[in-house]
Image: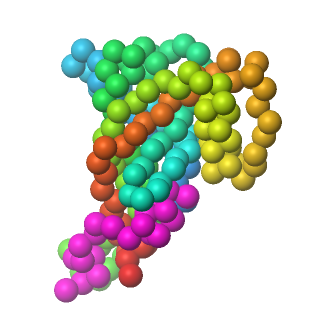
Amino acid sequence: MTPYAKPRFITDPEIIRKILDRCKIIHLGMQEDGHVYVVPTNYGYTYEDGKLTFYSHGAMEGKKWDIVKKNPEICVEIDTGFELVDSQDPCDYGNSYGSIIGTGLATIVEDLQEKKEILNNITRLNAGTVHEFSDAMVRHVNVLKVEVTEFTCKSGVMYQK
């Protein structure tokens, strides 16, 4: 069996956390009136006791917010790596990557203190910093919370043990 034929599903929380920390963009998939809408954005997350929650932010208005208000069911996807793993045998080509795909329910966060904590979660993951956000600052940004109800984590060679 070649290394690429191994099962690629990852259940180890340590590896899942590595993938969550390495990725920087989340793709939020939403549906409105039979049409799919996908938005790439920076994210933050919490992952405790197998429960995964993603966070995003953005302007106060826009299509993303309109859709979430109508239909809070959302698909999330993150990925990292994707380097070709070469082989002499064309059937053994593969990719080195890590990815998480899941579904969940999205809510728009209204509480100012919770918004501040989430914004710091996002900046800590993406910039390695923590900031003091004033009430005035957080009143001018929407914050999205996606409580993931189910997800799978997969990896090519990158995170295989």
| Residue at image point 78% right, 40% down | 131
Residue sitting at x 54%, y 13% = 61
The correct choice, above or below, for 120 with respect to 72 in the image is below
Is 115 left or right of 85, judged from the image as shown? right
- Give the quarter of the image for residue 87: bottom left
The residue sitting at 55% across, 42% down in the picture is 43
Can residue 105 be seen in this snapshot? yes
Judging from the image, the colouring scheme is rainbow
Q: How many marks?
A: 0
Query: Can residue 97 be seen in this snapshot?
Result: no
- Tell me where residue 36 appears, x and y as whole percent: 29, 26
Of 139 and 3, the residue lying toward us: 139
The quarter holding residue 9 reads: bottom left
On-image quarter of the N terminus: bottom left
- Compared across the picture, whether 19 is left or right of 134 comes to left
Give coordinates of residue 133: x percent, y percent: 76, 31
The structure residue drawn at horizontal position 78% and vertical position 26%, both measured from the top left corner, is: 134
Q: Is residue 155 above or below residue 32?
A: below
Would residue 140 appear left or right of 31 to someone viewing this image? right
Between residues 87 and 13, which one lies in front from this camera angle?
Answer: 13
Return the x and y of residue 95 as percentages of the image width and height: 36, 67
Is residue 33 depicted above or below 1 in this figure?
above
Q: Which residues are magenta?
A: 1-21
Q: Is 100 a magenta residue?
A: no
> Whole-percent x and y of residue 58?
58, 25
Which residue occupies the foreground of this view, 85 or 68? 68
Which quadrant would the C terminus be assigned to in this image? Answer: bottom left
